[in-house]
Amino acid sequence: MTIGKALAPLKQMNVLSLLVIVILSSALLILINYFTLRITSAVRAYINGESQYSKGQKDAARDLTLYLTSEYTIYWNHFRREIQVPIGDSLARTELMKNGNEEIVIYLFTTS
């Protein structure tokens, strides 16, 4: 019985240390998951922005080519509308590099 009494505090220590390890591991996994979701969201936003930029460029080039071959003003108007996307993004990026006003950057990104 004296051996059992001597081992009782050690068993409690083992259980307590295992519980601490499980809690710390869970907290670490939650933290890793949080940052993984943040990074994934940022990458998706970047890809979406780049997609809109390249689509605007492609559509503007197509409309300009159609205008040059047909001389219909509707294609010129489409070109001017579509070219605003890459131009607005370029202006917004320039403003971001200058550490400009955030409202101006948002306006330039959203109006294009």
Image (cartoon, grey):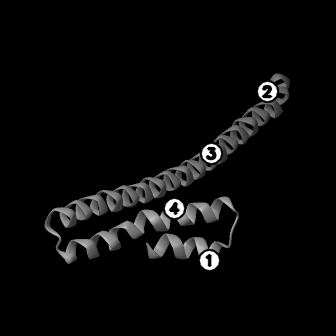
Give me the residue at 74% from left, 32% from top: 14
Mark linked to residue 103? 1
Nearer-N-terminus badge (4/3): 3
- Residue 111 against residue 38 in the figure, above or below: below
Q: Position of residue 41 (x, y in %)?
A: 50, 56
Instruction: State which tag comes first along the sequence, 2 or 3.
Output: 2
* Amino acid beneath label 3: Ser
Which residue corresponds to mark 2?
4
The answer to whether residue 100 is above or below residue 32 is below
Circle nearer the viewer, 2 or 1: 1
Against 48, is 105 above or below?
below
Q: Residues within 10 Å of mark 4 (few under 14, many from 20)?
A: some
Q: CA distance from mark 4 to mark 3?
A: 43 Å
The first of marks 2 and 4 along the sequence is 2
Q: Secondary structure at mark 3?
A: helix
First-in-chain label (4 vs 1): 4
The C terminus appears in which quarter of the rendering?
bottom left
- Foreground disc of the pair 4, 3: 4
